[in-house]
Image (tube, coloured by chain):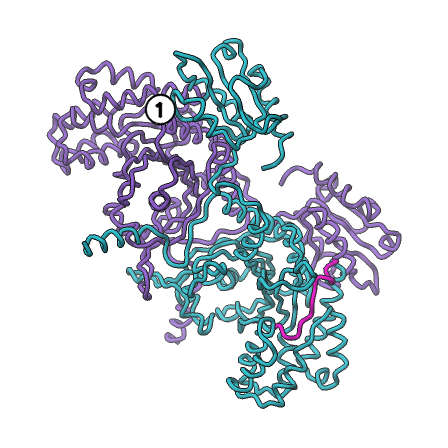
Chain colours: A cyan, B purple
Amino acid sequence: MAASDSVSSRSAAQLKTPKGTRDWVGRDLLLRDRIFQAASDVFKRHGGVPLDTPVFELRSVLSEKYGEDSRLIYNVEDQGGELCSLRYDLTVPFARWLAMHSNIKQIKRYQIAKVYRRDQPAIARGRLREFYQCDFDIAGNYDPMIPDAEIIRIIFEVFRALDLDVVVKINHRRILDGMFAVAGVPQERLRAISSAVDKLDKATWDDVKKEMVEEKGLSNDVADRVGAYVRRSGTMKETLEALRSNQDLVANEDIKAGIADMELLLRYVDAMGVADIISFDLSLARGLDYYTGLIYEVVLKSNGGKPSQVGSVAAGGRYDGLVGMYGKRPVPCVGLSFGVDRVFTILDAQQNKKASELESEVDVYIMAAGGKGFDGLLPERMAVATQLWDAGLRAEFFAKVKPKMIQQFNAAEKIPVAVILGEEELAAGQVRVKDARAGDGGEVEKNRGELVNRGELVERVRQMLSGVTIK
Amino acid sequence: MAASDSVSSRSAAQLKTPKGTRDWVGRDLLLRDRIFQAASDVFKRHGGVPLDTPVFELRSVLSEKYGEDSRLIYNVEDQGGELCSLRYDLTVPFARWLAMHSNIKQIKRYQIAKVYRRDQPAIARGRLREFYQCDFDIAGNYDPMIPDAEIIRIIFEVFRALDLDVVVKINHRRILDGMFAVAGVPQERLRAISSAVDKLDKATWDDVKKEMVEEKGLSNDVADRVGAYVRRSGTMKETLEALRSNQDLVANEDIKAGIADMELLLRYVDAMGVADIISFDLSLARGLDYYTGLIYEVVLKSNGGKPSQVGSVAAGGRYDGLVGMYGKRPVPCVGLSFGVDRVFTILDAQQNKKASELESEVDVYIMAAGGKGFDGLLPERMAVATQLWDAGLRAEFFAKVKPKMIQQFNAAEKIPVAVILGEEELAAGQVRVKDARAGDGGEVEKNRGELVNRGELVERVRQMLSGVTIK
């Protein structure tokens, strides 16, 4: 008994997707595609060129790019030949591609694809081991802050297309590092303190200070100075004013350069009409080491106008050193990555869930009615379906030679238009058409509907569809 | 010297994609997306539901499905946890998904995704280790041959949408096996002989016969009888007639059942208007073991009306046993897979190649002109770009504070409409708009173009674009 139990449970266990992965089907997938479409429409409008890279890269291409997160990389088995790993993000493959094509001086590229991380999955919170990223990056030498401003414009356009109100939190790595230096943080602890400060959006100041003092060995005074500097956010104008009014900060070369960048940025986002979606937040730090200038993180506005607690829905920044790591040439880059899964979760929650996620979106159902001796009219139903397909309409019929009326009615239940064939009507070159959503509570009844000549069928169906509420 | 050479060549060698994979970029990618769009439009029209499965599956899900091709499967490294492999096709993940969801009685599903095979790559012939498949399958119990006929209709609609003329070669596994049995092929050599016969589209009869006799141990007589049976193709009517007129063949139970299927199919494809794209070819065998009924293979019609030599552009068949292999329940299926790479190669060759595959598709280029002391009008260019983006137009400008005229002209070279800003015009609320393709050989010249009020800019640009030949 035990043995057979274990066999059957093992066989059942095999019928699943691997840990941290899922299937996507039907409406979920179509909603996800709608997000991709909205984003890629905006990317193309800004001159973006699509790129698609292999799902695995040479292992050497990925190595030394992700710090301690490298342990999360999926390796492909050594089966002879090259050592490969699944991509961890889309930024490194883009940098590899740029390094390979030294003829490309400037490019805006976008890529929407799955990435892989052997992390502890938390499916309810939308954290999976296989998930989509949706990236837009501008690479090459341009005058300062012009591409950076366009990225913010793109963020605005994508979320506008999705009907979501967002706040773009921004900061500048050189201002952040400058503040740490002025506060007295030792050079070698910059990134550690930076990552503690980055938690201020979720943790209290007391907790963050405790981490800096107790875990990261900062003195109480230095920690307090860091706190005084970074706990400030507002419009770009307000935060710039606050920085400029502090003589200690302004004297620092990094901060001076950062302020100059931010002043330019303000001018440009103003010209692009998106200054008012920005919050200049001096505590924003971002985890990744490779950022060198502007960094940003996009959060949803809650109804009260304050940032919501969903976490960031897009993020990115400037990384001028990454492409140069391949030893070919440096290429300055700025880019952003949309958190497709979080955006999906938000939009999905807004939708009224339909009965079945597997429902296909069909316009017309073709059925046959007849009395005794009736042969089912299958070739006739096929021919009418073909007429509708040729007109670009989405049509189905019951795939039985002699379906019962009730079977056809049930199958047609959520489909807006029904075409009903009968032998007599067909002999006269006619069919019955019925708006299944009109009048009598949306039920298709036997022998009802209006008589239409075959030649006018497509037009009549189109009229009915255009009068029908979108599902 | 030698040491440094080897270092630099090693570092250069790392800058590539793994063997048998490639990057896709720009126009190539947009063409590929057009193929996917054409196919998924047709799939949706027929009630298809999209499915997306993880790129890797539990290794046990893939095992014992591919016969000796299993050696081509990419395994993911054992890094603790479950053993996984990259998917080899989209059929087995679909069968796994069907077995997991026993509530699903009938479904039409499509999936467009990459699959992985550690084969010897032949990039010039379009054979890669990472490549796309585009599958449509109808699963569940229906009356015989109705789904099979709809698959052929779908093939017709997809290639019609791509403007390609095709021939659908069909055969039936039970007819094929029946012919082998009647000819005297021993039961245990059926599949081996089947795979020899399948080569008749590329090899001569003499070569195939040689393989059957010398390698596969058939007697001369049996081989000749096989040859006499299978070397026959024509319309469905012709081939059915030939089969029916042979008493030896008609007496075989498998052939009898196959003929009944084919008669039904003929009736249905006739009703769906696609009987005349079919060639009933008794030598078609298809490699995969799991087919149980109708099989088909789609080839391009050459200009002379005969099948071309490109090889098949789509293929598939009925596989009623595969889902049952997961031990849950049997689900009969019929499906097809489009050879996206071959279709891409054909369509790509038809296109006139543009100068650069990386060209983005931009509608409008915004430039600034001015004399001495001119400040470049960057925020003004940004504001005009924003106006155009808001109208859904694809607009770019030169990302420099003070670009030279020649730089802007060069960047705008292939873009249909130019908007030229000058300080005086802007002060009067106007800009210049120029159709860069009209009249004077398509060159944008300094200080030319028509004056337009800012409020009328979008409309005027739209007019110019609609008058411009599609690139």
Examine the image and state in which quarter residue B178 appears: top left
Which residue position is annotated with label 1? Answer: B279
Whether residue B13 is visible to the viewer of this picture, yes or no, is no
Quadrant where the N terminus of chain A sits is bottom left
Which residue is at 33% across, 33% downward?
Answer: B317
Q: Is residue A208 above or below residue A366?
A: below
For the magenta stretch, what is the residue range? A273-284
* Image coords of residue B159 (percent x, y): 47, 32
At 44% from the left and 31% from the top, the residue drawn is: B154
Q: Is residue B193 left or right of residue B309?
A: left
Question: Crowding near pointer 1: few (<14 within 10 Å), some, many (20+)?
Answer: many
Percent position (x, y) of residue B26? 55, 50
Task: Provide the chain ID for the residue under circle 1.
Answer: B
Position of residue B82 relative to residue B49, above or below, is: below
The residue closer to the viewer here, A344 or B335, is A344
Residue plotted at (56% across, 60% down): A337
Kind of element beneath mark 1: strand
Q: Is residue A1 magenta?
A: no
Query: What amino acid does circle 1 point to?
Result: Ser
In the image, residue A257 above or below residue A124: below
Measured as percent of width and height from the top left, residue B399 is found at 69, 61
Q: Position of residue B433 (x, y in %)?
A: 78, 46
Give the quadrant of the C terminus of chain A: top right
**Residue B345 sits in quarter:** top left
| Residue B385 left/right relative to A454 | right
